[in-house]
Image (spheres, helix red, strand yellow):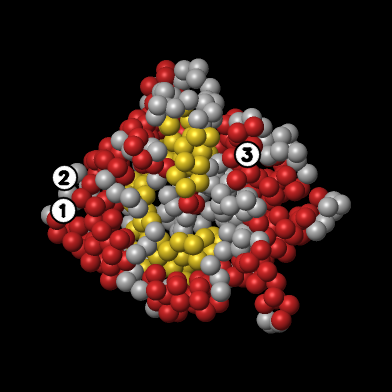
Amino acid sequence: MINVHDILETIRMIQDECLDIRTITMGISLLDCIDSDIDKACTKVYDKITRCAENLVKVGEDIEKEYGIPIINKRLSVTPIAIVSAACSESPVKFALAMERSAKTCGVNLIGGYSALVQKGFSAGDERLIRSIPEALASTSCVCSSVNVGSTKTGINLDACRMMGKIVKESAEMTVDDQCFGAAKLVVFCNAVEDNPFMAGAFHGVGEPDCIINVGVSGPGVVRSALRKYPDADITEISDIIKKTSYKITRVGQLVGVTASERLGVPFGIVDLSLAPTPAVGDSVAYILEEIGLEKCGACGTTAALALLNDAVKKGGVMACSRIGGLSGAFIPVSEDAGMIAAAECGALAIEKLEAMTAVCSVGLDMICIPGDTTEDVISAIIADEAAIGMVNSKTTAVRIIPAIGMKEGDVLNWGGLFGKGPVMKVNTYSPSKFISRGGQIPAPLHSLKN
């Protein structure tokens, strides 16, 4: 039951503690747009996206005004384009351009789904799409791409890891005049999920309805503010505080999702209750960890504190919403988190520590800038390492890494907005080339045999 205290508390969280809805994302199936004539297929894609999403931005803005809840992004995700383009023999870049046009017509911030799922091998369409990713991302401003290279059920496609090291490097090189931004719109997954509302990894899975609304919440500033009131709480009490705060944050996401669903006339999918940080001071997962008791994010104990945070966020949020999904937990993108940026700049946080943290957080090595002369094989090996964490632990992991072409450790890439700025971090340069060049499939773990 809503009371005056709840209303005032929500207003305070919005005004003073950076509470917002990070995104409402409409997922759209493009399976009925498949055509062997690529021009006809692209026309169908444009027509369907613009028809389904014509009112998305307006509805989002109306909800913002009505409830006073900031909705930072309105986004679209579509069926992996490698599936839609498989019937065409031409380059799938035309689909990326059609996605770009439709996104701009609808007025959304980003559109995801220039994607391929190759955890067990490549089709001809998959290879065409993957090889076209650098050109597609360089030719568009709001199209995002993802490739799934492994899963707990199938193992890891090491050939795909090797290919993606080259694709990530090329994506950065082709957008060097734009702060290598192409690589910032590209995610490599293990255990990718079908209902993720967050970019750059969102796509609309084949098991999803024809059209659906998913919501991604935020709220690190709210959690930090709540913890600050209890400086002497023990760790059990800390967990309980985070759970109660996560419940309140997720209620707002449920309200927005259900309202948007009703007004758009499409099913409500899920709330992804991840704590998604921003570069704004105070809106930081790293600062939560420091509030728990670390001198600096990256210190010994960081992984344990993050595990506590991730678990409490999920337990609190799941009671506040009818449907929880996506990646739910706590994100640790370096460039998008003021505390992570500060920790990386002072040397407290290294890639190796970030990798350890990814074993207990929502996603993985996210928005990390590395020296521009890092070899393709090293990038491929970073992808394989992160995929192994996901595969063995039955969780979603990802790599969104940006080779800063022409830059070295200590330099900074700066994109502004939600993407923030990224200090170039040191990478272990000892060669993994022989390992990566072997190719083949890393077998699935024994616990994948659950049938």
Residue 310 location in percent, x, y? 65, 51
Q: Is mark 1 on a helix, strand or loop?
A: helix
Which residue position is annotated with label 1? 38
Residue 113 location in percent, x, y? 35, 53
Q: Do tag 3 and tag 1 residues touch (Cβ < 8 Å)?
A: no
Q: What residue type is labelled 2?
A: Glu
Q: In which quarter of the image is residue 130?
A: top left
Q: What residue type is labelled 3?
A: Ala
Q: Is residue 249 above or below residue 426?
A: below
Q: Quadrant of residue 208?
A: bottom left
Q: What element carries label 2?
A: loop
- Position of 273 with respect to 41 (left or right) is right
| First reached walking from the N terminus: tag 2 or tag 3 | 2
Residues under labels 3 and 1: Cα distance?
47 Å
| First reached walking from the N terminus: tag 3 or tag 1 | 1
Q: Residue 342 carries which label?
A: 3
Q: Which amino acid does label 1 sit on?
A: Ile
- Residue 17: tell me if it is visible: yes
- Position of 138 with respect to 325 (left or right) is left
Q: Is residue 158 above or below residue 44?
A: above
Label 1 crowd (10 A; few <14 / some 14-19 / many >=20): many
- Position of 33 with respect to 330 (left or right) is left
Q: Residue at x 56, y 68 (%)?
A: 253
Q: Do tag 2 and tag 1 residues touch (Cβ < 8 Å)?
A: yes
- Residue 113: tell me if it is visible: no
| First reached walking from the N terminus: tag 2 or tag 1 | 1
Q: In this view, does 287 lie above or below 13?
A: above
Q: Residue at x 35, y 53 (%)?
A: 142
Q: What element carries label 3?
A: helix
Q: Residue at x 19, y 44 (%)?
A: 91
Q: Which mark is residue 90?
A: 2
